[in-house]
Each structure stands twice: as structure tokens, then as C-alpha cells.
Amino acid sequence: MSEVIIHEDESFERALKRFKKKCEKAGILSDLRKHRHYEKPSEKKKRKMNAAQRKTRRGRSHA
């Protein structure tokens, strides 16, 4: 769980910005989106294969 301590001379907006950045670094929002719906094992395998293909295609174009 991410936590931010607000200092006396700090505005709420600034603390909120720090909290959002901390959550993004921890990957909380992406994890939440990933677990929003159940993904069948076959769908997960298909998604990972597509991602691997995209990655190899990207790598070849730079070489």
C-alpha cells in the first residue's frame, strides 16, 4: 500500500501528485486494470504471444 505523509508547508495538490507518482511506480493501477476481468488461460497465452511477436518485430526494425 502506497502512503504519502503531507508536510506542514506542502499543499494538498503537491502531495496528491506525489501519491499518484508513487502508485504509478508501484504498478498499482496497471495491476488493477489487469485484474478487473477474469482472463482465461488461453487468452493469457495468446496475449503474451502477441506481445512477444510485437517485441521481436520492434527489435528487428532497429537493427
Image (spheres, helix red, strand yellow):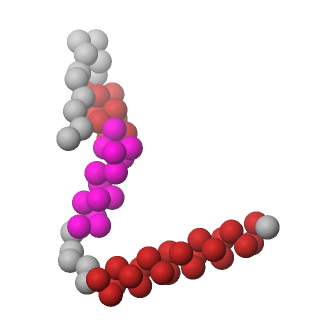
Residue in the picture at 25% in, 16% down: 7
Boundaries of the magenta span: 22-35
Q: What x and y, as percent, mark residue 13?
A: 29, 30
Which image quadrant is residue 62 in?
Answer: bottom right
Q: What x and y, as percent, mark residue 29?
A: 29, 54
Extreme residue toward the right, this view: 63
Residue in the picture at 34% in, 45% down: 26
Q: Is residue 27 magenta?
A: yes
Classify 21 as above or below 28.
Answer: above
Nearest the viewer among 53 and 30 is 53
Q: Would residue 31 appear left or right of 57 to someone viewing this image?
A: left
Q: Work out which quarter of the rendered image holds the N terminus and state it.
A: top left
Q: What x and y, as percent, mark residue 45?
A: 38, 82
Residue in the picture at 24% in, 38% down: 2
Extreme residue toward the top, this view: 9
Q: Would residue 17 appear left or right of 35 to someone viewing this image?
A: right
Q: Is residue 55 magenta?
A: no
Nearest the viewer among 16 and 33 is 33
Q: Work out which quarter of the rendered image holds the C terminus and state it.
A: bottom right
The answer, for residue 13, to whether it is visible in the render is no
Dominant SS in magenta = helix
